[in-house]
Amino acid sequence: MSYDVVTFGEVMLRLSPPDFKRFEQTHSYDAHAGGAEMNVAVACSRLGLSSAYVTKLGDNSIGHFIRNQARMHDVDTSHILWDPDSRCGVYFVEFGAAPRTNRVIYDRAHSAISKIKPGEVHWDDILDGTKLFHTSGITPALSKGCADTTMEVFKAARKHDVKVSYDVNYRGKLWTPEEARKFTEPASEYIDILITTEEDTKVVYGIEGENYEEVAAKLTDKFGFEVVLITLRETPSVLENKWSVFAYADGAVYRSPKYDIEVIDRLGGGDSCSAGFIYGYLELGDLQQAVNFGSAFSAFKQTIPGDLAFVNKEEIKKLVEGYERGLRIQR
């Protein structure tokens, strides 16, 4: 079977105290599945793209719960690898409100995917006929095996003429800037669409500029990216953000409208932007429309609890088109 989008990376069990409680005071947790690449696969599927998600999970009830979350959104999970002797990663999210920020605690060491090795995934079969492959900088940061497997799939994508989308997604708890640069610079040869932030660009690539256009132009000149997509978030408070997206391609600049968001859950917001842009890139045939769609999709998702985008395409089309019915209840 051929796919519009294939993604690869870790997904974890996410546990969050309800009602803005702190870790120390909660007696129960809301459970979700969360991971950058699965978030993208789910969002793409909800937008009508055929998507598959590749990972390695502990073969236990937690792993099955995670798999089922992707299945619920019609993501093909048949390529998931299972390890009966390994665990699934877990992360805990404490939601705050100004002046208390959100807080995350990771418990992901020795997870099943961290033990993956090149040759375990049949990339030639999976990517044959696929349009686009997506992963993020979180994946190669998990272990040497993950880094080697990421390079393996990049080379397979080039062989099968599959576009590659890569979200820099730097995590300082997983690797140093030097380690990230050592992987990312050679890997950039295989990347068509780079998704990043100004801060991640500075940390991972060591590139700065007077403005976003200069940063994107420097990245493109050095590595030859087809598109550089930069997400822009202003945080006047924890629960009130301003969100927009900027893209650079062939010397041209594309900017989305700026959205005022009442943030319910910003986790997965960047992944939703990636998915919305990918949908626009593959289906709309116009970079300005792709940027607008990615920005609107992400803004909408950030009003919904959980990592996954419980959003449909028609809602985003109306938002992009400036459809307004005010904030009255829709009946």
Image (spheres, rainbow, N blue to C red):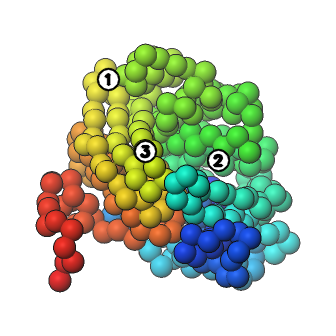
Circle 1/circle 3 CB separation < 8 Å: no
Of tags 2 and 1, the one toward the viewer is: 2
Estimate the x, y position of residue 12 in percent, counting from the top left. 66, 65
Residue in the foreground of this view, choosing between 128 and 205: 205
Q: Can the viewer see residue 152 in this picture? A: no
Where is residue 224 drawn, in percent x and y?
46, 23
Disc 2 residue type? Ile
Q: Distance between the residues labelled 3 and 2?
A: 27 Å
Q: In this rendering, would 328 be left or right of 38?
A: left
- Circle 1 residues within 10 Å: few <14, some 14–19, many ≥20: few
Q: Name the residue under label 1.
A: 250
The disc label shown at residue 296, or none: none
Which residue is tagged 2? 138
Instruction: Please report whichever mark, 3 or 2, sits nearer to the chain's N-terminal start.
Output: 2
- Which residue is drawn at the image coordinates 24% and 39% (left, top)? 288
Q: Which residue is drawn at 40% across and 21% down?
A: 211
Q: In which quarter of the image is the C terminus?
A: bottom left
**Residue 330, quarter of the rendered image:** bottom left
Dot 3, crowdedness within 10 Å: few (<14), some or many (≥20)?
few
Say which label, 1 or 3, has the lower sequence index.
Answer: 3
- Residue where numbered disc 3 is placed: 236
The amino acid type, in three-letter code, at marker 1 is Asp
Q: Residue 179 at what x, y percent from top left?
A: 74, 32
Q: Residues within 10 Å of mark 2 (few under 14, many from 20)?
A: many
Residue at 35% of width from left, 33% of height from top?
247
Q: Can residue 26 be seen in this view?
A: yes
Taking 329 as reference, is 17 left or right? right
